[in-house]
Image: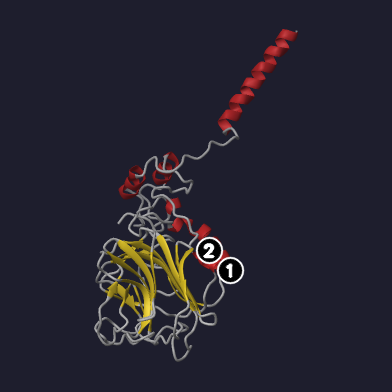
Amino acid sequence: MSVKGIGVGCKVTVCLIWLVICGQVQGALVAHYTFDDEANLGADSSGLGNDLVSEGTPVYTASGIIGGAVDLDVDSWFVRDYYDDGTATGLAFPTGVPAAPAAGNGSYTLAAWTFFDSPDDLNCGIVGWGNWVDNGTNVLRIDPDDGVQVVSNYWWHNDLTVVSEVDFKDGNWHHLAVTYDEGANSRVLYVDGTAIGTDAPASGHDMAPINFSVGGTRVNRNGGGTVQSFVGLLDDVQVHDAALSETEIADLASIQQSLPGDLNDDGFVGGDDLDIVRGFWGQNVTAGDLESGDPSGDGFVGGDDLDIVRANWGEGTPPTPSAVPEPSMFAGLIALALAAATVARRRGS
């Protein structure tokens, strides 16, 4: 699957942006799945140790919105406390994730970057947990039906469901999020940082601390049920124990995508990018490091990387030429000035 994203080589810039974002976000980040570690795709970077285990064959890709991402098919997802067959994994429900009775009906935020490729007849769970009883679940999902794509925060019989004007199958990354403020009894759905729907749920939430999963939610996993599989790429899945503000959600969704093959991040694929590949040709480099010429993400600069640059040649907007002359131009101008001065002296003598 060919997608646009930010390579590992841009991580320094992204990390600086991320520090600013994290400084603005209120409430604890209790689960965070970046999918950057190919050897441990389910690693949690929140610091709480809420790592996941995989089912099926989730596949690492370097083409995430921020570094790496995970590529999921209909039979692949991640779980925390229960496998698909109902067998316990031996891991506890994630620390800090809001659930009754430990955290009451608690406020929360669910957020993720998605590159959607699911069939039209499949409810597509992104992240969620709970049991299949009234108000007992909490799932962020996309529900495509006959080409109409619906975004929902699924509680079971008390859902916030909104028809999206965004086509999630347009070949681009899209950011989805939902917030719930328990004190204000307010729930808001967001697509690409913009609120698309809100409600005040009629009754309280009683989400059970069980069945936590990402990319294939099944709220009755420990007792049967149907998997709600997400098909496509997922990146930067987050769970907060507070309702983030509209501004904070917009910050999470503000990361800009770069062009495939744009290794120097100037918004254009051209000779400068080709020079980067040529400069590192035949070398082993950090996988996915664009500045080292590895857009393919295999850790080796070669034909695959050259093909990516060639396939996207001329895409984007050519950089505006600098108003400052190149050093060689300076030399030419100086030579012309000296020649003019010599001619002037000769004429004056």
Mark 2–mark 1 Cα distance, whole angstroms, equals: 9 Å
**For mark 1, does the 10 Å Cα neighbourhood hold few (<14), some (14 to 19), or many (20 or more) residues?**
some
| Residue most extreme to the right | 349
| Sequence order check, earlier mark of 2 and 1 | 1
Q: Which mark is residue 297?
A: none
Q: Which residue is mark 2?
A: 251
Left or right relative to 227: residue 198 = right
Q: What residue sits 44% from the left and 43% below the top?
A: 268
Whole-percent x and y of residue 54? 31, 75
Q: Is residue 87 left or right of residue 30?
A: left
Front residue of 70 and 302: 70
Q: Secondary structure at mark 2?
A: helix
Measured along the vertical axis of the image, is residue 328 above or below residue 267? above
Instruction: Quadrant for the N terminus, please.
Output: bottom left
- Residue 255 in the image, given as x and y percentages of width and height: 48, 59
In the figure, 37 relative to 334: above or below? below
Bin the neighbour count of mark 2 within 10 Å (Cα to Cα): few under 14, some 14-19, many 20 and up.
Answer: some
The front one of 72 and 306 is 72
SS for tag 1? helix
Which image quadrant: the C terminus? top right
| Residue, far front | 202
- Expressed as whole percent of the image width and height from the top left, the position of residue 218 reads 30, 79
Q: How many marks?
A: 2
Type of residue at label 1?
Answer: Gln
Q: Is residue 329 above or below residue 83?
A: above
Mark 2 residue type: Asp
Q: Residue drawn 55% across and 65% down?
A: 247
As drawn, which residue projects farthest toward the bottom? 101
Which label sits on residue 24?
1
Q: Do tag 2 and tag 1 residues touch (Cβ < 8 Å)?
A: yes
